[in-house]
Image: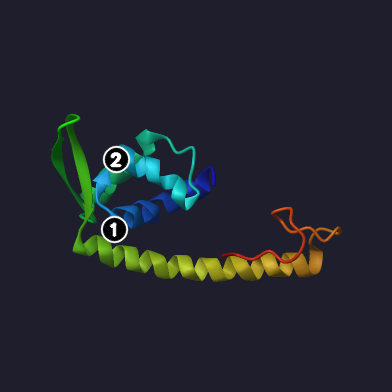
Amino acid sequence: MYGSEVRSLLYPFLLLLIHERPDHGYDLIDRLPCLEVTGVEPGHVYKMLRNLERRRLVASAWVTSPAGPARRQYELTALGKTELTAWMTRLAQLHSALGACLARWEKGSGSPDGQTLDGKPGRYVIS
């Protein structure tokens, strides 16, 4: 994903990654590709993390490491878990709407050669 789509979804993506495992900023950036998010500027991620902390959705603490300097580790708060749950509900609704949109595209006005949007024959399925 690229551009404004990533910026608008980075918020719940970071909440989810922190929920799965509290982590440092650069480690969270390294984990974003598991959600198919690439090319995100580190500065944007850190700005988002500070915003999440200001809103009390995450808490951070300095953690020392034998391999290097202390780094800030982010952890989800109870309020953050509530916000993450609300985001997952909205994303499930978006998933359904996108699936319906793509199915209509392929049924009515999709590629004349029978190719799906991902270039493969058959139906496009959102997994």
Q: Position of residue 85 (x, y in %)?
A: 34, 68
Q: Position of residue 126 (x, y in %)?
A: 59, 64
Amino acid type, label 2: Gly
Q: Position of residue 35 (x, y in %)?
A: 46, 52
Query: Is residue 126 visible to the viewer in this orientation of the structure?
Result: yes
124 horizontally vs 115: left or right: left
23 horizontally vs 70: left or right: right
Q: Residues within 10 Å of mark 2 (few under 14, many from 20)?
A: many
Amino acid type, label 1: His
Q: Which of the two residues, 8 or 1, is positioned nearer the viewer here?
A: 1
Please tell me the numbered disc located at residue 19.
1
Residue at 77% in and 60% down: 121
Give the vertical position of 7 relative to 12 (above or below). Answer: above
Give the vertical position of 74 relative to 85 (above or below). Answer: above
Residue sticking out furthest to the right: 112
Give the vertical position of 106 relative to 76 (above or below). Answer: below
Looking at the figure, which quarter contains the C terminus?
A: bottom right
Residue at 15% in and 32% down: 66
Q: Which residue is mark 2?
A: 25
Q: Residue 56 is drawn in which quadrant?
A: bottom left
Query: Is residue 46 visible to the viewer in this orientation of the structure?
Result: no
Find the distance from the CA under tag 1 to the CA under tag 2. 14 Å
Color scheme of the displayed model: rainbow
Q: Which numbered disc flags the more N-terminal residue, 1 or 2?
A: 1
Q: Residues within 10 Å of mark 1 (few under 14, many from 20)?
A: some
- State the SS at label 1: helix
25 horizontally vs 115: left or right: left
